[in-house]
Amino acid sequence: MSDDESKSPPPHHDARMRLVWELLVLHLKLATEAIRDIFLSPVSIIAVIAGLIAGGDKPDLYFRRVQRFGRKSDLWINVFGVHHRGPSADEIVKPIEESLLAQTRPGGRFERGAGQMNQLLDAVNRKSAGPRDEER
């Protein structure tokens, strides 16, 4: 085994994989939130109409329920990861993240692709870090 093979990858390689994962999760959450919003728009209109027709002395009852659902789903989706209490989508995503990231490490299914991506990014980072000394 050569010296390079016995070394563990630098920490920034794992940080890159986490960053890519976080981007994917953010976009999944944004898409989920968008679908929820598309659904809630007509439902809120129907709730107001139903409240005006059948709500009696509480015409806002159905609309407030729609709002409550929106707030709860907002906390659950937790788009920007600021929600710290109660269940959220992050509980579903975390085990998947750990499993996928493990596959980018030595012996993992995606080790080769992650290694190639990191080599490319390391080369780009070296080139952009300072003057060109590579020709020595």
Image (spheres, helix red, strand yellow):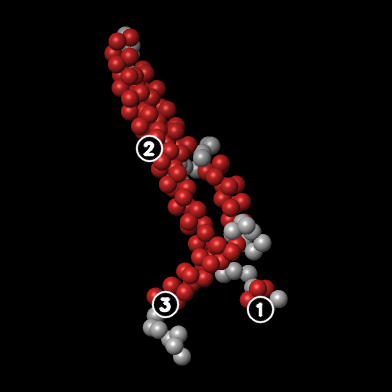
The amino acid pointed to by label 1 is Asp
Circles 1, 2 touching at the beta carbon (< 8 Å) = no
Residue at the (52%, 43%) spot, across then down: 90
User: Which comes before the other along the chain, label 1 or label 3?
Assistant: 1
Which one is in front, 35 or 85? 35
Residue at the (40%, 38%) spot, across then down: 33
Residue at the (33%, 14%) spot, across then down: 50
User: Which comes before the other along the chain, label 2 or label 3?
Assistant: 2
Q: Of all residues shown, which one is farthest toward the bottom?
A: 136
Secondary-structure class at tag 2: helix
The amino acid pointed to by label 2 is Ala
Q: How far apart in space, not on screen, are marks 1 and 2 (Cα)?
A: 49 Å
Residue 45 drawn at (x, y percent): 30, 22
User: Which comes before the other along the chain, label 1 or label 2?
Assistant: 1
Secondary-structure class at tag 1: helix
The amino acid pointed to by label 3 is Lys
| Residue 34 badge | 2
Within 10 Å of disc 3 (Cα), the crowding (few <14, some 14-19, many 20+) is few
Residue bearing the label numbered 1: 3
Circles 2, 3 touching at the beta carbon (< 8 Å) = no
Secondary-structure class at tag 3: helix
Residue bearing the label numbered 3: 127
45 w.r.t. 123: above or below? above
